[in-house]
Image: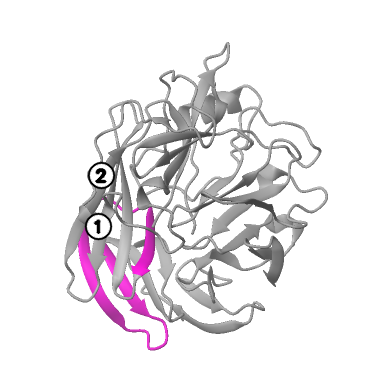
Amino acid sequence: MRTKVAVATAAILAAAALGGIQVANAAPAPQAGAAPYTGTAPHPGAAPYGEAGPHAGAAPYTGTAHDTGMERHADAVPHSEAVRYASVRGCSDKHEVQYPCGKWRLVTHGGERRGLADARITPLDAKGRPQKYSVAPIEVSGNGLHVAYFRKSDGRLVVREIGGKVRAMAGALPARVGMDDVTLILSQDGARLAVVLPEDRKLPTRVYDTASGAPLWTVPWNRVLLGFSADDDELLAYGETTETTLRVLGPSGERLRGRTLDKEGVYAPYGLAADGATVVTAQEKRGRWDVVVHDLASGRVLTRVPVGRSAPETLAWTGPEQVTAHFVTYDGSSRPARVRVLRIDTATKKTRVRESYKVLSDTIAFAACGG
C-alpha cells in the first residue's frame, strides 16, 4: 500500500539554496499546517537485519490484546515481528544541511530495531550518479511483511519478505530513468508492487508479482495511481482532469467504473475495498476532518465518521467493514513525535485507538506500514 517518505523541509530548502536537490519518492504534501517528517538528533548504528536490537527511546507498545505479539499472520510470522515503519537518520554537512546517512532501520511492532544493510539510502539518478541529499525510495506493505527497495550491491529493485526471501523485480528500472524518479506502491498484503515511472517519459506503470518478481500488467502513463484494492485485483487512480474524479482500473488498465466526488472540501488519502467499488477517503470542511466511505457504483455516501482536526496520513481497508487510519503528530521542532493508529468500524461508526508509538528522534525520512 502507498506510504509516505518525506524529508525535513528545512534541509530541503537549505540544500536548494546551495544548488538544488530532489526528494526521491516524495509523497503528496500533508494536510495544511502539518510539518513533514524530520529529525536531527544523532543515533547509534542499528544492528544488521536479522539481529534484533532494542528500540532505544521508544514508547512502550500500546496495542490492544489483538496486537500484543500473540497474533500471527497467515504465513506464521508473529505480528510482533512485522515491520511497523522504516526510518533513516540524518547527518549534517558543513553548511548544516541534512542528508540521509547510516542505513535503513526497520522498527517492528514488537519494538525491535533491525538494520536493512542491503538497501540504498540515497538514489542513483538517470546517469548513475549518487544523489547525496535525496532519499532512495522504500515502501512497506500494509501488513508489514514485505519491504520494497533498491539493493545497494547491484541497484536492482527488490522485495524482501520478512522471515523469507529477497526477490528482484525483472526489468523494473528502464534505461535513462533514475531511482529518484520512481514511486513504489505495495499492496496491503505485499503480493503486488506497482512501480510508477516519471510522467514526462510517458512510460506505463508496471505491476509485479512479488513472489516471483515477474511483471503482471501495466497501467497507462496518464493514470495517477493511488493504490490497490484490498484484494489486489483492481487499482484506484485519479481521473484525467481532477483529483476528485476517481477511476477503478482492471489488470489491463481498462476502466471498470468511476465517479467524481463532492467538490466541496479537501480530500486526503484514498483506499479501495475488495469489492472494487467502495472507496474510503478523508474530507475536510471548515477545519475538521471526516473519514468518508463512498459507493462509486451509485455515487452515494455510505458513512461519515468525524476524526478531528487532523487528516490521516494513510487509510486502508483492513476488514470488510474496518478501516485503519494513521495520524502523525509533531513536536515543537516540527519533528515527527508520535504516530496514532485508529481503527474505524464503518458499520457502527465506532472508533478505537489500536496503538500509539514514537518515531526515532533522529529520523530524516520514514515510511510506515499503513495497515
Looking at the image, do the residues carrying marks 2 and 1 touch, with CB atoms under 8 Å apart? no
Quarter location, residue 336: top left
- Categorize mark 2 by other alpha carbons within 10 Å: few (<14), some (14-19), many (20+): some
Residue named by callout 2: 356
- Magenta-drawn stretch, dominant element (helix, strand or loop): strand
Whether residue 308 appears in this view of the structure is: no
Under mark 1, the amino acid is: His
Q: Viewer-proximal residue, 54 or 32?
A: 54
Quarter location, residue 222: bottom right
On the image, the x and y values in percent for residue 115 come to: 52, 32
On the image, the x and y values in percent for residue 313 come to: 37, 52
Query: Which range is magenta?
Result: 289-318
* Colour approach in the figure: one colour
Residue named by callout 1: 66
- Categorize mark 1 by other alpha carbons within 10 Å: few (<14), some (14-19), many (20+): few
On the image, the x and y values in percent for residue 136 come to: 61, 39
Q: Earlier in the sequence, mark 2 or mark 1?
A: 1
Q: Viewer-proximal residue, 177 or 351?
A: 351
Under mark 2, the amino acid is: Ser
Query: What residue is at 54 percent from the left and 76 percent from the top?
Result: 233
Q: Is residue 304 left or right of residue 233?
A: left
